[in-house]
Amino acid sequence: MASATVGNPSNHPHLLVNKKQKQAPSSFSDASIFDTLAEDNEYATLKKLQRHLEYIQLQEEYIKDEQRSLKRELVRAQEEIKRIQSVPLVIGQFMEAIDQNTGIVQSSTGSNYVVRILSTLDRELLKPSSSVALHRHSNALVDILPPEADSSIAMLGQDEKPDVTYADVGGLDMQKQEIREAVELPLTHFDLYKQIGIDPPRGVLLYGPPGTGKTMLVKAVANSTTASFIRVVGSEFVQKYLGEGPRMVRDVFRMARENSPAIIFIDEIDAIATKRFDAQTGADREVQRILLELLNQMDGFDQTANVKVIMATNRADTLDPALLRPGRLDRKIEFPNLKDRRERRLIFTTIAAKMSLSPECDLDSLIVRNDPLSGAVIAAIMQEAGL
């Protein structure tokens, strides 16, 4: 028992205290080691982040230098493009694209070239038959012109419309009514035709001897409507180079569709719409191509486009039957020489209303004559009397 008591450490508390005192220094040394390791890791992380920051700063300086260099190249490229696009340039027509960088163009001389296309141009705007600008020496395509840039077709503005009214046109009551029904009414009351279930007339032909008031009545139509008015003479479509005439026809109808409601007046239509025959010369074939393009355009635009076509001629017997068929020129209005005394009196009265006449002036002596007189002849008679 005594030996067991002596051998049990719990019976000697001072021994336990001494043991704990001997173990304490070991725990303190472990904590210091951990602190040292943590400080080393933080220092290594800091150094790593510093090196990464220096690398990013070097990259930033490199990118800034590269950006400055690219800006200088951009300025030089822009100056080069301005130099290339500087006038004088040659106007041409784009035919088709070969690939992204080359295409086929037709110059103003009529020759076709395979040329390079400036890389800065929008390919979406580069369509066949579009007007383009070519470099003077290399013929490279350097710019895309707006559709109306080289067009000789002009649309009359509101301040350019004729000041002729229906009251200024003496007589021609039947012709006035017919042209208003065929041209004005579809433009102003299109819903009426839709309710009835019919299509309004697409075109009107005015025919008759010279000086009977065809053009003057069209001026009154242009004055009385708010629609855009495009006037062109048939001979203007006949151009020097092949393809120019049909392109002008397309330009006229394109302009009318873009500015609808619109009225297209083609005077002296017999210059391009005579009966077709077996043409032997290039000029005759070009005129026939213009007529085919005109027929195609008249068939192409729909009824909702609010585009009306008025044609005038004094040689209706020479026109091509394809142009006169229903669906193209639905209404033909004749302007005969004035044999009716009532019509003569109306024209004399209309012209005399603007003049200072003496009481002795007798217009009846001129009205009762049997000679066929046109409106232009009556106007010339009154003008000579005034002189």
Image (cartoon, helix red, strand yellow):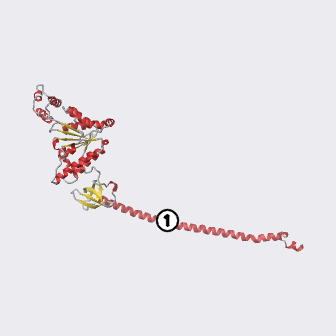
Extreme residue in the top direction: 359
Spot occupied by residue 373 in the image (x, y as percentages of width and height): 12, 34
In which quadrant will I find the N terminus? Answer: bottom right
How crowded is the residue under tag 1: few (<14 C-alpha within 10 Å), some, or many (20+)?
A: few
Q: Residue at x 48, y 65 (%)?
A: 57
Reply above or below: 17 against 324.
Answer: below
Q: Residue at x 39, y 63 (%)?
A: 70
Residue 239 visible in this rendered orientation of the protein: no
Reply above or below: 38 against 346.
Answer: below
Name the one closer to the observer, 286 or 384: 286
Spot occupied by residue 205 in the image (x, y as percentages of width and height): 21, 40
Q: Which residue is mark 1?
A: 56
Spot occupied by residue 140 in the image (x, y as percentages of width and height): 28, 60
Spot occupied by residue 225 in the image (x, y as percentages of width and height): 27, 37
Name the one closer to the observer, 353 or 270: 270
In which quadrant will I find the C terminus? Answer: top left
What secondary structure is marked by label 1?
helix
How many callouts does the rendering have?
1
Q: Residue at x 43, y 63 (%)?
A: 64
Name the one closer to the observer, 222 or 204: 204
Left or right of 228: which side holds 352?
Answer: left
Q: Quadrant of residue 192?
A: top left
Extreme residue in the bottom direction: 3
Q: Residue at x 77, y 70 (%)?
A: 21
* Amino acid type at image mark 1: Ile
Residue 364 visible in this rendered orientation of the protein: yes
Q: Quadrant of residue 17?
A: bottom right
Q: Quadrant of residue 217?
A: top left
